[in-house]
Amino acid sequence: MIPCQRSLFSIPNEVVYLNTAYMSPLMNSVVDAISYGAKLKASPWDLTINDFFEDSELVRELFANLVNVSKRNIALVPSASYGLETAAKNLKVGCGRSVVMLENQFPSHVYPWQRLVKEKGGKLIKVKEKQDRNLTELVLELINEQCAIVAVPNVLWTNGLMLDLISISQRCKEVGAALVLDLTQSVGAVNTDLGQIDPDFAVVAAYKWMMSPYSTGYLYVSEKHWDGEPLEGNWISRRDGKNFSNLVNYTDHYEDGAVRFDIGERANFALLPGSIEALRQLHKWDVKKIEKTLRQNNSILSDQLRSLGFIIPSDAERGPHFIGAKLPENSPKDLLKILASNKIYVSERGGVLRITPNVWNNPEDYQKFLTTVAAVL
């Protein structure tokens, strides 16, 4: 178990922040690193060619180690949508073929597939939740020889229901379907082994559970797609890009690996130092220990919420870091406003209270939240 890490953040004592699924606060060390990086641009005469490459390679390696793959599999992207559009650009559907996804999936993991089937043919199949059925089983039933792509998350962003990605990946390989994952709502809080899962593409927007700056993220690309087409034709991922004086000798050749899919201006002098600091701290904590800590705290909190009338999936059905609590019928319509007026912050998605604590929360936070909710029901 990881003890409360509140001292590493600038969170006022009266604030109860239970909303990591919306956005994490930044650690003080990350803010300092961003400040340091921003100041580099204030004196560009001190920047060297290595400054355009060293931090991006370090952040690539740190993230790769976190998810147990080679850094050659990782591209640097600014958002989930950027990575998912990259995946859609390099995959095929066609008439008679399908893209399987979840109903109520996050929009960034829907729009690229809507566009793809509109342009290339095929159809979208959305898996609906059923009270008496396991969500993974429902997905597996629709992965057949007509399935071209399975585009799913690890954890559904509205309620925290979790999928077994190993089983889904195995089934995809049996029928020859591509697997594209949005892991924004899990990596950093749930131990994730992409080497074992072996998807075609997997994206992580890093401003939530990765506790990193906004507009930073990572795209895993399987070796089979390393010759694919990136969204941008930038120069920095090309072969011999470090030779600035030779850039006018244009080339069609990229550096090896997923680097060709990097965003342009990836050498973000302000944000990359913050990402590096956040990744280093995640390694220090160990994501397995983060997961264990959140699992235990959330299991206790879930039981207490059920006693107040909330309907919550079992611990086996939901992500260990994520509580999706269906509101009791007598809940006030302005519950979020009431909580916010008491400096308690959660979110609601489709009638489900989304409660996502993290390592900065302490027992006093949980008690204040429960007492406040109990008083208004």
Image (tube, grey):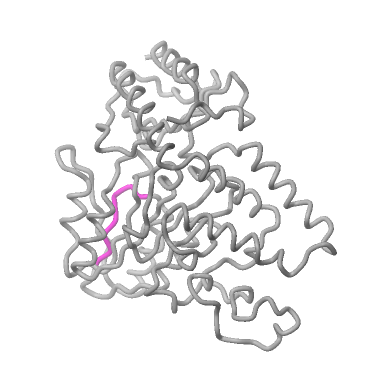
* Image quadrant in which you'd find residue 331: top left
The secondary structure making up most of the magenta span is strand
State left or right for residue 261 relative to residue 178: right
Point out residue 368 in the picture as x, y percentages from the top left corner: 47, 15
State left or right for residue 373 relative to residue 30: left
Classify 333 as above or below 233.
above
Point out residue 110 in the picture as x, y percentages from the top left corner: 37, 57
Classify 22 as above or below 11.
below
Residue farthest bottom in this picture: 249
- Is residue 61 magenta-colored? no
State left or right for residue 32 relative to residue 116: right
At 84% from the left edge and 58% from the top edge, which residue is drawn?
43
Location of the C terminus (image quadrant): top left
At 45% from the left edge and 33% from the top edge, which residue is drawn?
347
Point out residue 13 in the picture as x, y percentages from the top left corner: 60, 20
Residue range highlighted in magenta: 98-105
Point out residue 184 in the picture as x, y percentages from the top left corner: 44, 49
In front of the other: 37 or 103: 37
At 29% from the left edge and 65% from the top edge, which residue is drawn?
149
Classify 355 as above or below 146.
above
